[in-house]
Amino acid sequence: MPVTLLAEDGISIQPSCYSRLVNKWYCTDYLKDRHHDLTSALGQHLQITAWSLVLGIIIAFPLALLARRLPRLQGAILGSATMIYTIPSLALFPLLVPFTGISSKAVIIGLALYALTILVRSMLSGLSGVPEEVRESARGLGYGRTRLLFRVELPLALPVIMAGVRVATVSTVALTTVGAIVSYGGLGNLIQDGVQNNFKAEILAASVLCVVLAVVLDAIIVGVQWTVTPWTHRRRSA
Amino acid sequence: MRNLRDAWDYLTTGANWGGPEGLWHLLVQQLLISVTALLAAMLVGLTLALWLGHLGRAGFLSVNITNVGRAVPTFALLAILVTLDHPGTATFGPYGRAGLATLIALALFALPPIYTNAYVAVREVPPAVKESAAGMGMTGSQQFWRVELPLAMPLVVSGLRLALVQVWATATIAALVAGPGLGTLITEGFYRTDYPKGIAAAIVVAVVAFLLEVGGALVERAVDPNRKGTEIRATPPGGRTADAVGT
């Protein structure tokens, strides 16, 4: 029976919960052995998400202002934004590749376009929710257009805008995984590798990390909003 | 840019549309699985939402179901479902194991927009309208079928449209786990560096998604009982709840 002994020996050397013979969903040895994979994928995921959101906000803000200034353009801007939204991500990333090449740029631009549609909407509805009397009093106090926007309108619109930023953030984190199609999907790359090799621990770890990342970022944004808009919650304690 | 031109050539070559691996066959396959998933989700989600909305209970569910649905990556759910050892799934009709995983994932992702929109639609029927209905001697079920449901219809259909477009998008992602549909051409094109093929399939997917969206909008307009004048609105302020966060 030396053969069996050898085989058993082979197993005992291997990590207990993942090997050619054992394939468990939850596996701490995997987390220990491959934490470099996980942290680098998480880093890429975070980077792609952050850049897409920044790019989305930078483009969405002037678009929202433009749509507000020119009501005739509003329909066109919102319409084309909705149109982008209907394109499935697995189709959008490849469609961007001819312009960007195979790089994280394809994923970042695609995700920024999706975020854009949510952000423009929330910025518009936030700004239009500012009461007209408030605007008039500010003008009466001698506020110019720019100062009115940044000192009065934006702060008042912030809760609605931030609600949009939260939705955009959570969905961008989830969508980044699909970037795996062009090999820049952060944790999605691990999920894809897990599916191809039938490696359960890898799939579950990456999936859970992805949801955790979304929840943590959401909580951070709520925290930031809480600190930058003290007037929304100070009144109660006074 | 050459890839784009080659993709156009791929689309305009008739041979690429026919056959079991052709664009047309895969398109029909993806539409079939999308519609099946939508019907399954409607059966559960619509029934539950309309009933609970009529009773005015479990409002917290309509908020949270959407948030949860948004945070869970479609791809992750698909990956888990396809790797799961559920019994008797080695073959599932013509689509295999990945087909069943896809169907379950699609139905799950169709639930939040269907449920939330239908629930909100029934809840937001103006109380004055409901009171007059009750005052006219309508029973609870008469109120629901003759007053609440017709008024809620546009928003309910808007939820279905949202769900259908989302399901179509998700069905494309299914190709990442070897599922059926047009996505297979996209992934194949990329893994075998046949980019024009992948791009061509992506164009078809995007065009169909757009057509579904437009068709849904037309149906939505057709079922609106207020289209011809009266002022009763079941739509909440802010218009349609855009929650189909792209998949």
Image (cartoon, rainbow, N blue to C red):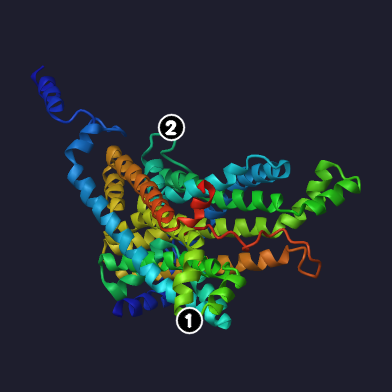
Circle 1 SS class: loop
Q: From this viewpoint, is residue A156 visible? A: yes
Which residue, as the protein is rendered here, is positioned at the far left?
Answer: A2
Name the residue rendered at 31%, 68% in the picture.
A106
Identify which residue is drawn at 89% across, 47% down: B135
Q: Position of residue B115 (x, y in %)?
A: 60, 48
The answer to which image quadrant residue A229 occupies is bottom left
- Name the residue type under label 1: Gly
A174 or B92: nearer the viewer:
A174
What crowding class fits label 2: few (fewer than 14 Cα within 10 Å), some (14-19), or many (20 or more)? few
Q: Are both tags, 1 and 2, on one chain? A: no
Residue A110 — which label? none
Chain on which label 2 sits = B
Question: How many labels sit on residues?
Answer: 2
Q: Would residue A212 appear left or right of A84 to someone viewing this image?
A: left
Q: What label sits on residue A144 in the rendered view?
A: 1
Toward the viewer: A226 or B185? A226
Q: CA distance from mark 1 to mark 2?
A: 69 Å
Do the residues bearing badges 1 and 2 touch, measured as CB atoms within 8 Å? Answer: no
Chain of the residue displaying label 1:
A
Q: Residue most toward the right?
A: B136
Q: Residue drawn at (86%, 42%), measured in percent from left and top?
A: B139
